Image: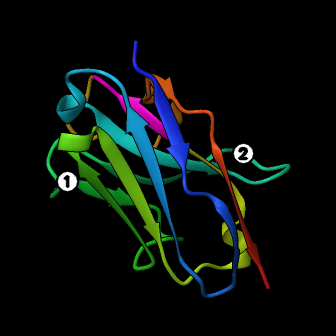
Amino acid sequence: QVQLVESGGGLVQTGGSLRLSCAASGRTFSRYGMGWFRQAPGKERDFVAAIGWSDALKNYADSVKGRFTISRDNAKNTVYLQMNSLKTEDTAVYYCAADINKRLPGRDGEEYDYWGQGTQVTVSS
């Protein structure tokens, strides 16, 4: 069983920045592929970014490429999502997820095995 706890959400103005954190339990965190997803009110859950076992293995949604950066610190069992140049359309609940079976997880949320409870990000104009 893997537990994921997100933090770092909040209210920020357009153009601002936030860093989300996701702390994971488990002894083999370095072998978890990790992803970030988001869900806005009334919309489906969307892929945001994923990172594999290696920090060099990353994947981003086109809508956040160049603005968001996913990273991980295996010593702290934590994955991060640095969000810069935030837009109102980035407003959503952000979830982290773990895929314990893939070296680099994909964009399909169905592939992930564990999910956090989510953290709210609100970007105001």
Which image quarter holds the C terminus? bottom right
Within 10 angstroms of label 2, few (less than 14), some, or many (20 or more) residues?
few
Which residue type does callout 2 highlight?
Glu
Q: Quadrant of residue 121?
A: bottom right
Residue 44: mark in rendering: 2
Residue 124 magenta-drawn?
no
Q: The residue tagged with tag 2: helix, strand or loop?
A: loop
Residue 42: give x, y in percent of width and height: 85, 49
Residue 112: give x, y in percent of width and height: 44, 28
> Residue drawn at (30%, 24%), measured in percent from left and top?
100
Tell me: residue 117, above or below residue 93.
Answer: above
Evaluate if marks 1 and 2 touch, with contact meaning CB atoms under 8 Å apart: no
124 relative position to 26: left or right: right
Residue 115: mark in rendering: none
Q: Is residue 81 at all visible to an observer of this figure?
A: yes
Tell me: residue 38, above or below residue 66.
Answer: above
Which residue type does callout 1 highlight?
Leu
> Residue drawn at (55%, 57%), measured in percent from left and top?
8
- The residue at the far right in this view is 42
Instruction: Give the dominant element type of the magenta stretch: helix, strand or loop.
Output: strand
Which image quarter holds the N terminus? top left
Provide the residue span drawn in magenta: 96-100
N-terminal label among 1 and 2? 2
Q: The residue tagged with tag 1: helix, strand or loop?
A: loop
- The residue at the far front in this view is 76
Residue 97 magenta-drawn?
yes
Dot 1 corresponds to which residue? Answer: 57
Residue 32: give x, y in percent of width and height: 26, 31
Q: Is residue 105 at all visible to an observer of this figure?
A: no
Within 10 angstroms of label 1, few (less than 14), some, or many (20 or more) residues?
some
